[in-house]
Amino acid sequence: MKLKTMAAIVLVALLTFGSTANIAMAGTADERHVMADELAKVIPTGSDKADDKLGKVIARLHKAGTAAEAGDLEKALKEDASAVKYLLKALDELDGEGPVSTISSTIDAIVATDSAAARDAIDAARSAGADAKYLAKAIDHADDGDVERASGELDHAVSEYADAISYAAKARAKSGNGSTTTTSTTTTSTPPIDGFKGKYSEYTFWFVNIESGEQTGPLSGSSHPDNALGWTGKANDGLLEVGGSVMSLHVSCSDVFSDGVGSKSDPAADSPWRVLRYSITKFSDGKADKSCDVVVSTPPPVVESPAPSLAVDKTYRVGGGSWLQSSSAVPDSVSNVEEVDFRFQVVNTGNVPLSNVNVSDDLLFTATASNPQCSAPLLNPGESMECVVTGRVLHHGTHVNTATASGTAGLVTVSATDSVHLDVWPDIE
């Protein structure tokens, strides 16, 4: 049985051990210890592998309880996430046999408790006048946790709730002086914080909008903890505001932004912005130890705005002669018994394909035509079609014969016209 299948059992499981109130309200360290003690009672389960997984769960729940007693909820929830992961594996090993209800109830209680803890932390940060950007991140992680929970990815859900608590704490810490660092539009480095003993990156990116051709940059940021926008807790993660939206970036000198899209991550999956160039400096313990400045070798193609159009050229000839254009000022003369060939040349002059391309001509309604069909199912940009209609103009007098070519691009229909002016005279022998 797969983990996701077993996760479905978790969502509908009933609490079957100990005090229902204690398990459902497991928000304190003591109750995490209680959950660990209750799980110890179901060992052995009949599966050595399941017993091994439950042993790891018990250890992690005790660590989570100790962390919560010390006020470190972020660490407690990370231990919870690991515990849920091993609980799901234990369910997989048991395959529906043994203490499935007890294990499922424990998972359900952990996830519900951690969800409530994340929302409580967000509410507390909001009440304290928290930093808006950190608070938004906290809310996003809590919402993502709810999505993971609904889809049965329960260990991922708890990890998201842990991240929500972490960002809520940062948001609250920033509320005291309101000091936040916004994304700079220069390449000035973010000064390291005294005593910071971690790795981080400073980065500058240049972008092009593949829909409009607009370019922007340099836009700079940092994965240093002092950067309210750019810090995610990982040295290779970055955030930049590009075109009015915050974009997630993989900040690595080993990444290859072929056509403006990263090979290790896609920084522009939901955006028309693509990377043209990037400059990255890696820091460790406040000292630069690696840097790179790369211009993307294959610039991303700029996609033109759709501009459908076409053109038609109508000419004629008599008796197999040369193709002629006629003038409205001096109409050409033909006999009403002579066969006239009319040629229609249609070109897609736009930048998008045209479908259902068709030519109509008012002369065809007054001529005996041998080939009245002139159409094509598809014309790509730059492609053309040609057709010839042969007939005799039966009525004498001056005729203006207008050809109309049309085609469609999506919901848009475009057309073009061209005319031939003929003076038809009766053949009198």
Image (cartoon, rainbow, N blue to C red):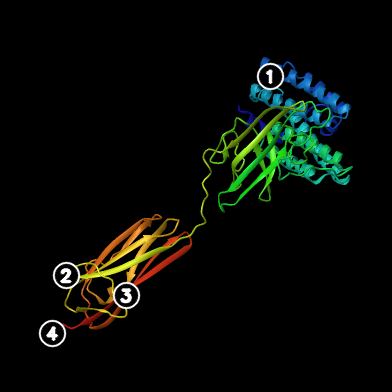
Q: Residues within 10 Å of mark 2 (few under 14, many from 20)?
A: few
Q: Which type of secondary structure does the marked residue at label 2 adopt?
A: loop
Q: Which type of secondary structure does the marked residue at label 3 adopt?
A: helix
Q: Which type of secondary structure does the marked residue at label 4 adopt?
A: loop
Residue picked out by circle 4: 428
Residue picked out by circle 2: 319
Q: Residues within 10 Å of mark 3 (few under 14, many from 20)?
A: few
Q: Nearer the viewer, mark 1 or mark 3?
A: 3
**Amino acid at dot 3:** Asp
Report how far apart the C-alphas of labels 1 and 4 lie in the structure.
108 Å
Which residue is painted at 28% across and 63% down in the image?
Answer: 387
Residue picked out by circle 3: 362
Q: Nearer the viewer, mark 2 or mark 1?
A: 2
- Asked if the residue under mark 2 is in contact with the one under mark 3, i.e. CB atoms within 8 Å, the reply is no
Give whichever of discs 3 and 2 has the lower sequence position: 2
- x and y, in percent, of residue 2 in the image: 61, 28
Camera-side residue of 25 and 284: 284
Residue picked out by circle 1: 50
**Amino acid at dot 2:** Gly
Q: Residues within 10 Å of mark 4 (few under 14, many from 20)?
A: few
Give whichever of discs 1 and 4 has the lower sequence position: 1
Name which quarter of the figure residue 349 lies in: bottom left
